[in-house]
Amino acid sequence: MPPQLSATTLLAIVQPWSEIEEPILRRLTQVSDAGAGEEALWIGCGSGRSVLWWCGRFQKHTDGVDPDPNAIEVAEQAGREADLASLATFQVADPADLPHEDKVFDMVFVHVLYLPGADAQSVLDEAGRVVRPMCSVVALVPAWLKTPARQDVLALESLGISPRIPVEWKGVMRNAGLVELTVEDAGPDGSWIAHGIPTLLMRGWHAAGWVGARTVVERPMRALRRLVRRRFLGLLIMKGTRWPQN
């Protein structure tokens, strides 16, 4: 990822909230059987929109962690403005070394796209550690649906995106002590990012000025849009349950 552009800013550009991100959350709600859990954790919460949406919908306390201090500052301010500060707790934390005790959450969500450079296995291990037995970990993960060219792999790596094939993601979940795995497509037909150049240029400019606008038209972002549009790259919702003995 260009050093001037954080993961939170990049996703704010390519995943407009009302058009893309909120529909993904509604889909996530269906997959996770949300509402049964009493307390949830979001790992890779970014600027906190998902956490605050969750708090507003279910009126239950939710924690959000992210390695980006600027994103957490924005999330805390948004929580105060939405009058949800009593329900949402945000903190800067290493997603591979969470500041939580074992088995304390009824549900854990992991947004891998917000965690560029993090080791996915270590992050999912931590998610499995802090979720209660017989409760769920739900991860949003980028996945290869077809074999990519080497230059496309490198282009996505420069954006901080490291996809795996679905069977590899299942292995990561199992290694984290999670079973009864299910997989859903978060954005059928590549609908999990926006594609129109004029709209993306405008969003890039509003989000980060010239840096944001330039990023939209540079090769890595062009590769991302092409790979998603041609269904080489997907965003999957993977859910697993922690068994009592794990």
Image: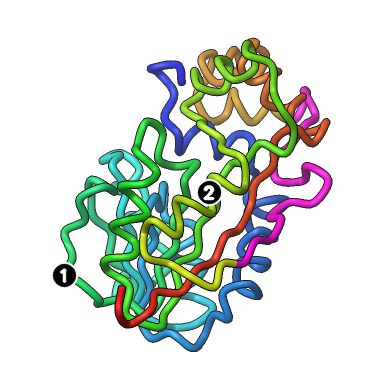
The residue range painted magenta reads: 182-199
Q: Is residue 130 visible?
A: yes
Quick check: is 186 in the magenta stretch? yes
Q: Amino acid at mark 2?
A: Trp
- The residue drawn where x is 44% and y is 62% is 109
Decide which of tag 1 and tag 2 comes sooner along the chain. 1
Q: Can you give x and y, in whole percent of width and height, for residue 215 in the image? A: 58, 16
Residue linked to disc 2: 169
Q: Is 182 displayed left or right of 37 in the figure?
A: right
Q: Can you give x and y, in whole percent of width and height, for residue 150 in the image? A: 62, 13
Q: Work out whether residue 46 or residue 101 is closer to the camera in this orientation and state it.
A: 101
Quick check: is 85 in the magenta stretch? no
Q: In the image, is residue 168 above or below residue 154? A: below
- The residue drawn where x is 31% and y is 70% is 85
Q: Amino acid at mark 1?
A: Glu
Image quarter where the C terminus lies is bottom left
Callout 1: 10 Å neighbours few (<14), some, many (20+)? few
Q: Work out whether residue 182 or residue 9 is closer to the camera in this orientation and state it.
A: 182
Q: Can you give x and y, in whole percent of width and height, for residue 154 in the image? A: 55, 15
Mark 1 and mark 2: span between their CA atoms?
A: 25 Å
Callout 2: 10 Å neighbours few (<14), some, many (20+)? many
Q: In the image, is residue 198 above or below residue 109? A: above
Residue linked to disc 1: 101
